[in-house]
Each structure stands twice: as C-alpha cells, then as structure tokens.
Amino acid sequence: MLLPSSAKLLRRPGQLTVFLSTLSLLGGCAGFSADGGFSAVAQVAQDRLAKDVAWQRTEQESASAAQRVKELLAAALSVDDAVQIALLNNRGLQASFYELGIAEADLVQAGRLPNPTFSLNRARQGSEVEIDRGLTLNLARVLALPYSKKIEQARLAQVQREVSLQMLNLASETRKAYYLAIAADQTMSYMQQVKQAADAGAELAARMTQAGNYNTLQQAREQSFFADAKVNLARAEQTQKRCQEQLTRLMGVSAGPTAFKLPPRLPELPQHLQDLQTVEQTAMEQRLDIQAARLSTAQLAENLGLSKASRFINVLEVGASRNSYSDQAGQRAYSLTLELPLFDWSTAKLAKSEARYMQAVNRTAELAINARSEVRQAYQAYRSNYDIALYYQNEIIPLKKRISVENQLRYNGMLISVFDLLADARSQISSVNSAIEASRDFWIAQADLEMSLLGRPSSN
C-alpha cells in the first residue's frame, strides 16, 4: 500500500474502489458459519457420550427436541434416557451454547477491516470558499488483522471445549441424580414394609398386654420400634422427594417428578472393573480441561508475540486529502499519523502480557498434576465402593436371609415367639439399608470416575 497512490484516490474514484477491494482481501472472507461452531460440541457428545445434542435456535428445532423428550418420558427411564433428556431439555445447557455464538461473532469481527474515516470541511472568507475532504484508515489494525484472527480462532476452539465440558458435567450430574433417586425409592419402599411390620408388632403387643401375657416393658419396646419406624419412613420420603426434584431440574422437566417413571431397583453390579493404569493414561489423553488449558496458554503466547511486535505502534493511520478553492487550483495531499513512544514505551503492557502467559503456564502444569490425582482418587472410590457393595451382595445379605429362614422354622415349630421373629426383622433393617447405600455409592463413584476421565468445567 503506497502512500502516494493513496493521495490520488479522491480524484480517481475507480482507483478508490480498487484500493478498498485490495484491502478487503487482507480481511479474508470470514463470515458466520452455518452451525455457529456447534458441530465440535455435537461431535464430543457423540464420541464421549454416544448421545445427541441440539442447539435449539428455531421453533422447529425446539419442537423436534420436545417431541424426542416426550417419547423418552413415556416409558420407565434408563440412565441413558435420563442423560439424553437432560442434553435436549436443560435450559442452562442451551444458554451455554450461546457462548459459541459470542465467540464466533468475535472471530468474524476480528477478520473485518476497520472502517475508514471520511472528513469534510467547508470554510468561507469573503468571496473565497475552501473545501477540505479527507479519508483516513487505521493502518495498525490492518497490519494486525492476521494475528487478531488467529487469536480469536484459538479462543473459539477454547470456548468449544469449555462448552463441551459443561455438557459432559451435566451428563455426569444427571447420572448421579438418577442413581440417587432410585436408591431413595428403594429405601422408602423398604421403610414402608418396616413400618407395617412395626405397626403389626405394636398392635399385637398391646393386645397381649391387655390379656396379661406381656409385660409393660415388652410393650414399650414394640411401641418404641413403631415410633422409630414412622420417623425413619418420614425421613426416607423427604430424601426421595429431594432426589426426584434434583433429577427433575437436571432433566429440565417442568411438570415435576410425576412426569417420569424410574425402575424399582438399582442396576446389578458389573462383572468386570476398569484397570487403574489404563484409566490414568486415558485421562491424560482425552481430558478436555487439559486441552483447553493448553490452548489458552498457546493463545496467550500469541498475544505476547503480538504485544512485542506492536509495542511501539499504538497509533498508525494513513490518509489522503483534497482541498478545493473557489479562486485557485485545488491541493492534494496524503498524511501519516504515528504515535511517538517518548514517555510510554509499552513496557507495562509487555510485562502484563508476559505475567499472564507465565501464570497460564503454571496453572496448566498444576491442572495436569491435579488431574492425575483426581483420577487416582476417583478410581480408589470406584474400586472400594464396588468391593463393599459386592460384599453386601454376596456375604452379608445372604447371611441375614439364612438367619431369617432359620428363625421362621423355629417359629413354625413353636420354639420361638412371634416377637422373636419381629426382633430378627428389626436386626435386618440396618443391613438392607446399608446394602442399598453401598450399591448406590458404587454407581455414583463410577459416574465420578467417568467424569474424571473427561475433565472439569472451568470455575470462572
């Protein structure tokens, strides 16, 4: 771009058109994509979750998602169904998708040339008339255009990873809420049976006391057990409602818990577990938060390079002007405006960029160290909870059932009383509840382990 040629632009409109067309090539042909950068997020949903996700920007897309959700809610929900509903129906996730639109708009803006400035001034002194016309362009922004586009492209990729992490975190939280809700249903159902048995025992004890076959202490024990059973049932109902509402919020179901049905029991424990070494290696290869941190650090390195390259060029403008007079020939001129770094050498700006870059480097290293620790911790919980749940399933509960069968045989042979039978039932309550909790804790630990392999969303 030669400045003398710029001086001729105002008197040759054809050259002005060619000049501006040449500048437009520097900005490329950047425009908005058809999907707003969403395809990368949708691909993550397919690769990591094997689920569909939709950015509902039109009424047709919203109606299609609503129909899919309605179909899934028609039957008893599996954990995969619950996750799919959350991905399609959670309003918070839909809001996060618009971060992609913001980042893409910044990318498009970074690829566009700055608008030129046109000035017109008319002065009159007696019979003499002077008309000044000028056209200026911020040349510094034009020269920085390729760097700006590269920075915003990296930022869009970073936003895509952050949004993907938010989506994966929603899926993980939905899984955990699903298992919590089923476990709460199981516990409440069992506590209802306990209350019924306690009610029958208390009523029988009252009748036998009236008949003189039972003393006051024995009756008080049965009545106390009935009172405890009522309180425990009320607490189980509270927990059930809380867990159901949590699942409702994550799935975005406005109709409440009555809109969906859950299976009566938690899934059976798996036959095989994952290996720690494989899990840790997988996490380092595919955690999106580590990828996003590395990308952010690279972006700051680009910013640092741009700051070093432009530290002495804060203002650089090129312009052309033409002055017309009523009584003499017109004047043509060009101008170049450059800020002189006499007092501010941009050392503070450069130091700030360097500090931000080194800050990002250390945070990325910290994230990698913490990620390995999180995976090991999640795996330990996963393995430990599996062993506990399996022990309840294979040892403790079968032993309790054997004791119950033996007591039933003794009762049939009139070797023990009905109250001995009720006492045995009371002793099983803690074991059954603990078995349900152990199975629940394993499935929650598995969801945490799966999320530790994918990463954690940024807290800011």
Image: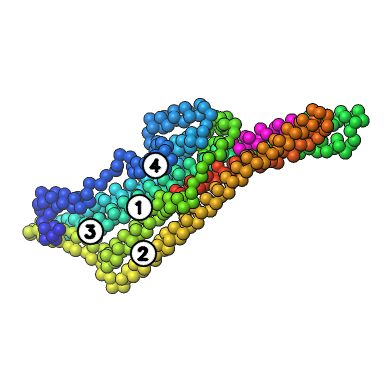
**Image quadrant where one finds the N terminus:** bottom left
Question: In what element is the residue under mark 3?
Answer: helix
Label placed on residue 47:
4
Q: Give me the C-alpha separation between circle 4 and circle 3.
A: 40 Å
Which-is-in-front pick, marks 1 and 3?
1
Q: How far apart are marks 1 and 3 (CA)?
A: 20 Å
Please name the residue that numbered disc 2 is placed on: 353
C-alpha gap between disc 2 and disc 4: 36 Å
Q: Which residues are drawn in magenta?
A: 182-199
Amino acid bearing label 1:
Arg
Q: In which quarter of the image is residue 135?
A: bottom left
Judged by its main secondary structure, the magenta piece is helix
Determine which residue is flagged by label 1.
Answer: 155
The percent position of residue 245, horizontal first and vertical second, equals 58, 37
**Between marks 2 and 1, how big is the CA–CA gap?**
16 Å
Work out whether mark 3 precedes mark 2 in sequence or the reverse, and give the earlier one.
3
The answer to whether the residue labelled 1 contacts the one labelled 4, judged by CB atoms less than 8 Å apart, is: no
Q: How crowded is mark 1: few (under 14 residues within 10 Å), some or many (20 or more)?
A: many
The amino acid type of the residue labelled 4 equals: Asp
Residue hosting label 3? 143
Whichever of labels 2 and 4 marks the residue nearer the N terminus, that label is 4
Residue 156 visible in rendering: yes
Q: Which residue is drawn at 52% across and 31% down?
A: 77
Select label 3 or label 2 by which is in front. Answer: 2
Q: Nearer the viewer, mark 2 or mark 4?
A: 4
**CB within 8 Å, label 2 to label 1:** no
Secondary structure under tag 1 reads: helix
Q: Does the magenta stretch include residue 266?
A: no
**Left or right, 443 with reference to 120:** right
Task: For mark 4, give the secondary structure.
Answer: helix
Q: Which of marks 1 and 4 is nearer the N terminus?
A: 4
| Residue type (three-letter) at the residue carrying disc 3 | Leu
